[in-house]
Image: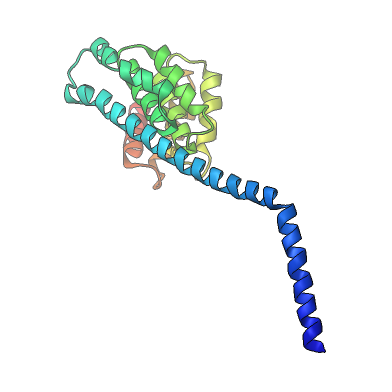
Amino acid sequence: MVDIFDEIDEELRAEKAQKLLLRYSGLIGGIAFAIVAVAGAWQGWNWWQARQDAAAATSFIAAITPIDATPTLEPATRVSLGAALDALTVTAPDGYRTLARLRSATLKADAGDLQGAAALWDQVAGDGAVDPLIRDLATLVWAQHLMDQADPARLESRLRPLTEPGNAWRALAQEQLALLDLRQGRADAAKAAFRRLSEDVTAPSGVRNRAIALLTRLDA
């Protein structure tokens, strides 16, 4: 008798399952189709992104090769050769767009177009998609090139965050702030900053050596 009841229960469960399957077969099929479609779209996106990256890499190398091959070019000629870089600053994927902006900014600065270069450095520094290390570098280079022109308060406000402990550009930012003190006639503050840098074993040797040289000149 127990076996008979078990068989009846199994048949009832099978019947219910069949009815449920028939009732929701459309929904189940739709979900399955959606899963397949999403997986296909994801693979397609990865393929397209890989092609975009490869094309950007090829364009970037093609743009910088003639510039690097002839370092004695006149600044204006170097900028004209950088037209392809300017195009990449708009059309390339994020990584190559950042590289193109930084390289194009350097070309413009070398040619005397500090306004154009500063605009590109600002774009990198303010781009949340860019690695913070690169964003801080763009800020530092911006300050280095505009040290004699930009508003001192603006320079300090942008350099000060880079002097926080753990920042990769800390010593270089401190050096720029010391130079800013000199620009504003605060010789004692500048000397104190250079002295700290000259004794900072964590600072790059180039920064320490420059600090020692400037201290010697200031003391003289």
Q: How is the image coloured?
A: rainbow
Q: Is residue 181 visible?
A: no
- Residue 194 at what x, y percent from top left? 42, 34
Q: In which quarter of the view is residue 175 placed? A: top left
> Which residue occupies 51% across, 22% down?
155
Q: Observer-nearest residue: 182 or 20?
A: 20
In the rendered image, is residue 46 in sight? yes
Residue 209 in picture, x, y percent from top left? 31, 37
Residue 90, horizontal then vertical, whole percent: 43, 21
Image quadrant containing the C terminus: top left
Horizontal and vertical percent position of residue 109: 34, 17
In the foreground, 148 or 39? 39
The residue depicted at 48 percent of the width and 15 percent of the height is: 150
Q: Residue at x 42, y 23 (%)?
A: 91
**Placement of the N terminus among the 4 image quadrants:** bottom right
What residue lies at 54% left-to-right and 20% top-to-bottom? 154
Q: Is the residue 64 above or below the residue 4 in the image?
A: above
Judge from the rendering whether residue 40 lies leftward or rightward of residue 64; answer left or right.
right
